[in-house]
């Protein structure tokens, strides 16, 4: 997520402002929560390996405290 946002900043030619960073981090958290909800609700049969739930549990700083 951070790598994508860094690339986006680079392409647009200017860094995000503080408020823009907070909005981007909130949008990323929403997407992760949405995906995790559907994985649980649909009974994803792949187990937890490499799902949104796995990433949030194993790498929380990358997803829950997004900064770049």
Image (tube, helix red, strand yellow):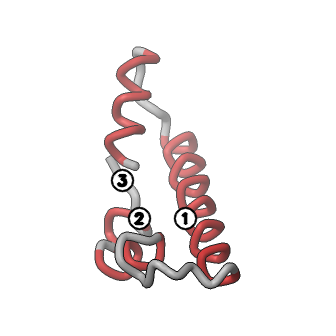
Residue for point 49% across, 45% down: 21
Q: Are marks 1 and 2 in contact (CB under 8 Å)?
A: yes
Q: Quadrant of residue 15?
A: top left
Please provide percent x and percent y for residue 60. Answer: 35, 74
Mark 3 Cα-neighbour bin, 10 Å: few <14, some 14–19, many ≥20: some
Per the image, the residue denoted by label 1 is 32
Q: Would residue 38 be found to the left or right of residue 7 on screen? A: right
> Front-most of 1 and 44?
44
Distance, label 3 to label 1, CA atoms, is 15 Å
Residue for point 66% across, 73% down: 38
Label of residue 2 in the image: none
Please provide percent x and percent y for residue 1. Answer: 40, 49
Task: Determine the secondary structure under disc 1.
Answer: helix
> Front-most of 26 and 37?
37
Label of residue 67 in the image: 3
Quick check: 11 above or below 55? above
Please tell me whether mark 3 or mark 2 is closer to you in this view.
2
Q: Earlier in the sequence, mark 3 or mark 1?
A: 1
Distance, label 1 to label 2, CA atoms, is 8 Å
Q: Which residue of the protein is positioned furthest toward the front in this rendering?
A: 45
Q: Quadrant of residue 7?
A: top left
Task: Determine the secondary structure under disc 3.
Answer: loop
Please provide percent x and percent y for residue 66. Answer: 40, 58
Q: Would residue 9 be found to the left or right of residue 29 on screen? A: left
Residue for point 41% across, 27% down: 9
Mark 1 Cα-neighbour bin, 10 Å: few <14, some 14–19, many ≥20: some
Per the image, the residue denoted by label 2 is 63
Quick check: 22 above or below 42? above
Please tell me whether mark 1 or mark 2 is closer to you in this view.
1
Task: Determine the secondary structure under disc 2.
Answer: helix
Distance, label 3 to label 2, CA atoms, is 9 Å
Quick check: 35 above or below 7? below
């Amino acid at each position: 997520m951070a790598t994508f946002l860094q690339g986006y900043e680079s392409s647009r030619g200017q860094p995000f402002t503080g408020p823009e960073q907070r909005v981007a981090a909130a949008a990323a958290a929403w997407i992760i929560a949405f995906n995790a909800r559907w994985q649980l609700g649909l009974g994803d049969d792949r187990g937890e390996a490499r799902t949104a739930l796995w990433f949030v549990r194993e790498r929380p700083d990358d997803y829950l405290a997004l900064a770049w």
